[in-house]
Image (cartoon, grey):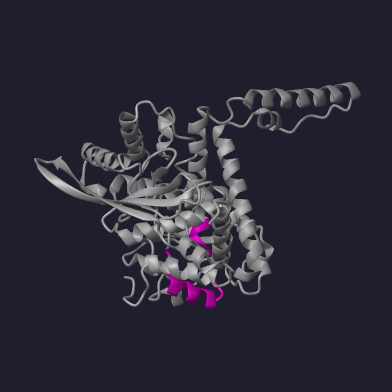
Amino acid sequence: MIPENEPSFRESVDIMFNRAVALMDLPPGLEEKIRVCNATYTVRFGVRLRGKIQTFTGYRSVHSEHMEPVKGGIRYATGVNQDEVEALAALMTYKCALVEAPFGGSKGGLCIDPREYDEHELEQITRRFAYELIKRDMINPAQNVPAPDMGTGEREMAWIADQYKRMNTTDINGVACVTGKPTNGGGIQGRTEATGRGVQYALHAFFRDAEGMKKAGLEGTLDGKRVVVQGLGNVGYHAAKFLSEEDGCVVTAIIERDGALHNEDGLDVEAVHQWITKHGTIKGFPDAQMQEEGAKLLEADCDILIPAALEGVINLGNADRVKAPLIIEAANGPVTAGADEILCRKGKVMIPDMYANAGGVTVSYFEWVKNLSHIRFGRMQRRQEEMRHQLVVDELERLSADSGIGWQLSPNFKEKYLRGAGELELVRSGLDDTMQTAYQSMAHVWHNREDVNDLRTAAYLVSIEKVAASYRAKGL
């Protein structure tokens, strides 16, 4: 539970914003223009289900239109409210600016527990929600482009895209009205894993930063680092899977809503994920200790803590007991403003949410560009790239034969070198470059300004300055 004296999620975002702008020289009017939410639409609509009409409440908030279209996910959860949606929309503005995705910030939500409805009912609800937003231009490839968030996924985005096309039959770019679609419905390879993959790339960038590593009291590589993951949804699952399988991290604990699993020798992330998919709970999973009070493991001794579920899980009530030297915010707002101050005083390093989970919007940007260009990445250049590589290999082999040296290329070299990059490889490359570049811009501020002591403030400074520059270019 979040303590009563804790600021709300929206208040936390405002506190962190104010902390950053206090270090900037912005005109008061421009500062206020960037801070406030431009508009929030509340829609209430009825759907006939199970023989009666049920009324649902949904929101779509636009924080900043310094760039258009605006971008942000739609979440389905019972706790959705206007304050939360507006806070998330503000974070999207700063997130897009930080990673140089050319969007303003937006967010949407529907007050619903999707587990209470079957697929057909969810489709009816989603299509009606989409209809209400589309007719107000709150979903449009040139104005407002949603994506999946908590409680939604490819399926819901495909329904929304189809609803848009039914209502806008002559819009040739209609499929670009949402991102996060299935690949056979206009999506892009690598989008489902994107946010989790971005968390992995963010850690790669941090572990290349010798000064940052020193501040966290860490050394070496990711190999062998003990990781605790809170939330094994889409983001937490992919982040934990990639870190354990590709980087050699040891996932010692996985925290879920019904408890936590703990094993100091390491958990098999894929096996846990399959168990949850099959049983709907972590209870009964073999090869691990079950902890009923899962949140206690946020305080476990580990190297890296990855909160990847809800906001406010690290708060005034438990921040002082968090032991992890490095916290990477895979979820939005998992550390409250009050907890942030405590952790900074204790010397903990936090990789902030607006950077750490930006993989989703980055690959959404790639999908949007793909939809507008009407061609998949790699289609024009892949075979030409392979032919040029073949020329190099042929020439090397000819030189070897003519000189009589008789050396041979390493095993698998030809296969790897000759294979041109397809869509998935290009998406991962673009995401890695984005995460590296964004980290460097934050780290430069963090390491070179005496009045900046943490990455979060550095991230806000970088992003707010970019938003301010956009408004100045518009003549504001």
From the top left corner, tell me how far across and down residue 178 is, in percent.
Answer: 40, 39
Q: Residue furthest front?
A: 475
Residue at the (41%, 51%) spot, across then down: 106
Q: Is residue 352 magenta?
A: yes
Magenta region: 334-355
Residue 362 or 107: which is nearer the viewer? Answer: 107
Q: Quadrant of residue 429?
A: top right
From the top left corner, tell me how far across and down residue 389 is, in percent.
Answer: 72, 27
Q: Is residue 266 left or right of residue 204?
A: left
Residue 168 or 223: which is nearer the viewer? Answer: 168
Residue at the (46%, 48%) spot, across then down: 238
Residue at the (38%, 65%) spot, across then down: 10
Q: Quadrant of residue 403?
A: top right
Q: Residue furthest right?
A: 403
From the top left corner, tell me how far across and down residue 135 is, in percent.
Answer: 30, 39
Q: Is residue 440 left or right of residue 181?
A: right
Residue at the (61%, 61%) spot, across then down: 442
From the top left corner, tell me how far across and down residue 476 is, in percent.
Answer: 53, 57
Position of the N terminus, as image quadrant, is bottom left
Instruction: Report if residue 242 is visible in the image.
Output: no
